[in-house]
Image (cartoon, rainbow, N blue to C red):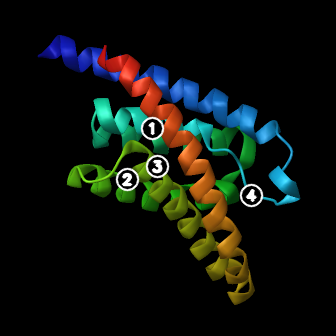
Amino acid sequence: MQKNRTKNIALAGMFTAAMFIIGYMESLLPPLFSVPGIKPGFANIPVMIAIYILGWKLAAAMSFTRIILSGLTFTGLFACIYSLSGAVLSILTMILLKKTKKFSVTAVSMAGGVAHNLGQILVAWLVLGRAVLYYFPVLVISGLVAGALTGMVTGIILKAFSR
């Protein structure tokens, strides 16, 4: 039992490092379609994998660790708050949908992408006011598209892991 736990923690550490690197690389990309705040979300692939093979606790720990490290290293405290609010809603949504066993990996990922954007827009609303709510439809579409891409890649990787 201890060997499996140690293996899972080591794997979570590797996934967290991968998320950190992928997240940094995504931050270097220009805004997609000249819309600020929209990213492909590939840093979430390790989280999705972890939800399915390591469990929600390690997945959540990985996500929060990456956000804190990225915030301290690259983006600052304010961006960290936005990311954390999105991550909390996203992780909760994905965990709940996965537990139902009624949704595909891609559908879970798409819901997570939209939930992430919802969390961020709620914080922006509190900070900047109601005007930012008009931006939410754009974020819903981007969350669906990014979630679909992330979910499809995650599905392929999970199939490889199952072998």
- Contact between marks 2 and 3 (CB within 8 A): the answer is yes
In this image, 47 relative to 51: left or right?
Answer: right
In this image, 60 relative to 137: left or right?
Answer: left
Q: CA distance from mark 2 to mark 3?
A: 7 Å
Give the mark nearest the N terminus, 1 or 3. 1
Q: Nearer the viewer, mark 2 or mark 3?
A: 3
Q: Residues within 10 Å of mark 2 (few under 14, many from 20)?
A: many
Give the mark nearest the N terminus, 4 or 2. 4
- Contact between marks 2 and 1 (CB within 8 A): the answer is yes
Q: Residues within 10 Å of mark 3 (few under 14, many from 20)?
A: many
Q: What type is the residue that disc 3 sits on?
A: Ser
Q: Quadrant of residue 36?
A: bottom right
In the picture of the structure, the residue carrying the numbered disc 1 is 47
Give the mark nearest the N terminus, 2 or 1. 1
In the picture of the structure, the residue carrying the numbered disc 3 is 109
Q: Nearer the viewer, mark 3 or mark 4?
A: 3
Q: Quadrant of the C terminus?
A: top left
In this image, 28 relative to 134: left or right?
Answer: right
In the picture of the structure, the residue carrying the numbered disc 4 is 37
Relative depth, front residue between 137 and 5? 137
Task: Identify the residue at image location x=38%, y=26%.
Answer: 158
Residue 94, numbered circle: 2
Q: CA distance from mark 1 to mark 3?
A: 10 Å
Q: Is residue 55 visible?
A: yes
Q: CA distance from mark 1 to mark 4?
A: 20 Å
Task: Identify the residue at image location x=26%, y=16%.
Answer: 6
Under tag 2, what secondary structure? helix
